[in-house]
């Protein structure tokens, strides 16, 4: 984007880069959820019973939801691109008639 204008192609490019972030985020969420930490294998100082495992499952869920939000934001940018293109084409057409 330059100045106060909007470059619809740049929006689409950025949307693609943002969407590409979802896969590593989802993988991180899955890895967090697959942790084996829990009662008996985290050491005496960290023996919180099932609380550690439950917390990791919640964290996994939050990370996975963040991945979904990334994709949603990306889709919204793509949809905005179409709106900007339509607006610019309509404005250009109105000037052609004058």
Image (cartoon, grey):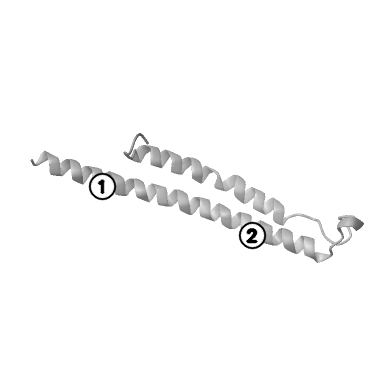
Name the secondary structure under disc 1.
Answer: helix
Q: Position of residue 25 (x, y in %)?
A: 61, 48
Extreme-left residue of the structure? 98
Q: Image check: 10 left or right of 86?
A: right
Q: Quadrant of residue 35?
A: bottom right
Residue 16: x and y in percent read 46, 42
Question: Residue 53, which numbered label?
Answer: none
Residue lying farthest right?
Answer: 44
Q: Quadrant of the N terminus?
A: top left
Number of labels in the image equals: 2
- SS assignment at label 2: helix
Residue that lies at the very extreme toward the front in this rendered image = 3
- Pointer 2 or 1: first along the chain: 2
Which x, y percent locates residue 7?
34, 38
Q: Is residue 24 left or right of residue 4?
A: right
Estimate how packed mark 1 is, as few (under 14), some (14 to 19) or many (20 or more) residues with alpha carbons within 10 Å: few
In this rendered view, identify the residue nearer to me: 7 or 75.
7
Relative placement, left or right, of 96 versus 77 is: left
**Seen in the image, is 7 located left or right of residue 61?**
left
User: Which residue is labeled 2 in the image?
Assistant: 61
Looking at the image, residue 92 lies above or below residue 60: above
Tell me which residue sits at (45%, 40%) in the image: 14
Cα separation between marks 2 and 1: 38 Å
Q: Which residue is mark 1?
A: 86
Q: Is 74 rendered above or below residue 44?
A: above
- CA neighbours of label 2 inside 10 A, class few (<14), some (14 to 19), many (20+): some
Question: Which image quarter holds the C terminus?
Answer: top left
């Amino acid at each position: 984007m330059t100045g106060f204008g909007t470059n619809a192609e740049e929006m689409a490019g950025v949307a693609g880069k943002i969407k590409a972030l979802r896969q590593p985020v989802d993988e991180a969420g899955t890895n967090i959820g697959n942790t084996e930490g829990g009662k008996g294998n985290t050491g005496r100082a960290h023996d919180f019973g099932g609380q550690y495992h439950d917390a990791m499952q919640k964290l996994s869920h939050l990370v996975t939801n963040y991945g979904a939000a990334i994709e949603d934001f990306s889709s919204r940018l793509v949809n905005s691109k179409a709106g900007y293109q339509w607006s610019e084409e309509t404005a250009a057409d109105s000037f052609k008639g004058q």
